[in-house]
Image (cartoon, helix red, strand yellow):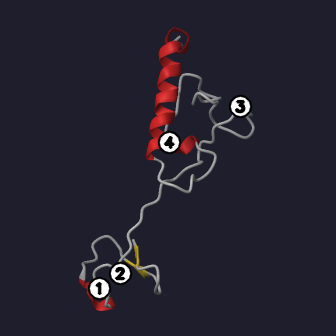
Amino acid sequence: MLVPYHRDPLLLEPGDDLTVIDRRGCRPGEIPLASTHPQGTCRMGEDRTRSVVNSWGQCHELTNLFLCDMSVFPSSLGAPPQITTAALADHTARYLAAHWSAVRS
């Protein structure tokens, strides 16, 4: 974890204790915390040369494998992805339910 952003970065390694922050002189409210949501590693699209899955989340190379997570987004959304990810999961689940007999064979 890097803290805080408005100063020279302070890298905290696993096992570091909070005295590292105390020595830095950070006060409550000065430590912004963030997380990342990796996106775009298994891009969705119909062009097999530029994407990993089709618009239903079905892998081009492994047709019985479906992905319905943030990895299929073309790039970072720039906003919290929870609602979009839930909508994508619903989209893929509806497709699977409607086409189950063809998909499972």
Task: Left or right? Give the position of 27 relative to 78.
Answer: left
Q: CA distance from mark 4 to mark 1?
A: 35 Å
Disc 4, disc 1: CB below 8 Å? no
Q: Mark 4 — residue?
A: 84
Location of residue 32 by image quarter: bottom left
Disc 1, disc 2: CB below 8 Å? yes
Residue 29's place in the image compared with 42, above or below, is below
Task: Left or right? Give the position of 11 relative to 29.
Answer: right
State the image coordinates of residue 60 (x, y, percent, origin top left). Answer: 65, 29
Disc 3, disc 4: CB below 8 Å? no
- Where disc 3 sits, the SS reads loop
Task: Left or right? Give the position of 87 relative to 22.
Answer: right
Q: Mark 3 — residue?
A: 46
The residue that appears at 54% across and 15% down in the rendered structure is 103
Counting residues from the start of the chain, the first of labels 4 and 1 encountered is 1
State the image coordinates of residue 7 (x, y, percent, origin top left). Answer: 46, 86
The residue that appears at 59% across and 48% down in the rendered structure is 40
Instruction: Specify few, some or many for label 3: CA neighbours under 10 Å numbering under 14, 14-19, or 20 or more.
Output: some
Q: Mark 1 — residue?
A: 27
Instruction: Look at label 2 and name its amino acid.
Output: Glu
Instruction: Specify few, some or many for label 2: CA neighbours under 10 Å numbering under 14, 14-19, or 20 or more.
Output: few
Instruction: Specify few, some or many for label 1: CA neighbours under 10 Å numbering under 14, 14-19, or 20 or more.
Output: few
Residue 86's place in the image compared with 27, above or below, is above
Q: CA distance from mark 3 to mark 1?
A: 50 Å
Q: Mark 2 — residue?
A: 30
